Amino acid sequence: MNDAVAPTSTTAATDPPRTAEAAVEIRTDWRADGLPALVRAEAPGTGLAAWLSGHREAVDRLAHEAGAVLFRGFDVSDDKGFREALDALSSRVLDYGERSSPRSEVSEGVYTSTEYPADQHILLHNEQSYTDNWPLRIVFFCERAATKGGRTPLADSRRVLAGLRPETVEKFERLGVRYVRNYLPDISLSWQEAFQTEDPADVEAYCARAGITAEWVDDEQLRTHQVRPAVHRHPVTGERTWFNHAYFFHVSSLPEEVSEGLLAAVEPEDLPYNTYYGDGSPIEPETLDEIRSVLDAGTTGFDWEPGDVLLVENMITAHAREPFEGPRRILAAMADPVGDLLGRTTEGKK
């Protein structure tokens, strides 16, 4: 993991100047790898929502260039202040639909970060890349930092794509990624939680709209599969990025004891998550190793401070979570569905 930090005594020549009215410094050189960029309020009590309202275009530009922006030193103390900042930052804050991980809603559009046990590492991924209407942004707020660990590592998905062998990229672009999910009682998220309904007909209608094949294995078990592209072009910047869950959802990404336990409990076709090439053929072990190696090489991180707000451009930057100790509390929200920007209908989708 690259943790080198650049000197912070000067502002990069290409950065926007300090804003005199709010005493805010904008830096892209505070870290050697430039990820995330830093926007730091130097005057106590500076409101983030108010500052964003006057600098939205500059922030959008900075986020697209750097891939993520860390807002530090602003007066954000709770989910209400976080939501106000979200509304100033993005045109549409989303509900968490087509769920793949456990979260609790704190207030409208604001959720806890993934509620996996503190000793588990959550691998790098681009939020909801397995869907057909993913959020362009995911935003985090540090209400309480961990006493040890608990960082949110990042990796530039443009660089990940560039780091993969051309043959690997070509095959994924040609075939896509097939995502297979089984909603199993007591093993994975239930279909009721994933789709936020108790009615199987609602699930079937959602899947039909979203290009998902749904199969009821029995009264309790739902199996779905969908094929999605592995490489996308950002609708604003035009850049190509590695944007998928091919490695994240593959059974081999789990700790060995976990994957062995799952395979001892269920048949391979009944795994909660697994991925294949779009034609259903298996992804080669050496290809999975390559993807993991490139992700690891591109990973960077910073230490959270209470009040931090992190804007992640979801198609440009992948995020993760380190294991931690202590009462860490990071809130999260998703915004700006890609379908809105591309003019696709999103009626009935969450």
Image: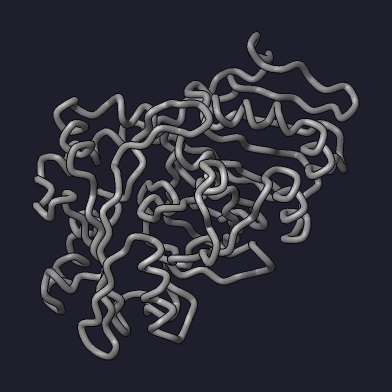
| Residue drawn where x is 32% and y is 75% of the image | 188
The quadrant in which residue 46 appears is top right
Residue 25 lies, in percent from the top left, at 75, 25
Is 241 drawn above or below residue 215 in the view shown? Answer: above
Is 32 drawn above or below residue 1 in the view shown? Answer: above
Is 15 drawn above or below residue 44 in the view shown? Answer: above
Residue 6 lies, in percent from the top left, at 55, 20
The quadrant in which residue 333 appears is bottom right
- Residue furthest right as drawn: 21
The quadrant of the rendering that contains the N terminus is top left
**Could you tell me if residue 332 is visible in this image?**
yes
Q: How is the image coloured?
A: one colour
Mark count: 0
Question: In the shown orientation, is residue 15 left or right of residue 265?
Answer: right
| Residue drawn where x is 63% and y is 37% of the image | 70
Residue 343 lies, in percent from the top left, at 54, 45
Question: In the shown orientation, is residue 286 left or right of residue 154?
Answer: left
**Could you tell me if residue 327 is visible in this image?**
no
Closest to the observer: 276 or 247?
276
The quadrant in which residue 168 appears is top left
Question: In the shown orientation, is residue 227 left or right of residue 71?
Answer: left
| Residue drawn where x is 42% and y is 42% of the image | 318
- Residue furthest top as drawn: 13
| Residue drawn where x is 18% and y is 74% of the image | 270
Question: In the shown orientation, is residue 111 left or right of residue 242?
Answer: right
Residue 250 lies, in percent from the top left, at 22, 56
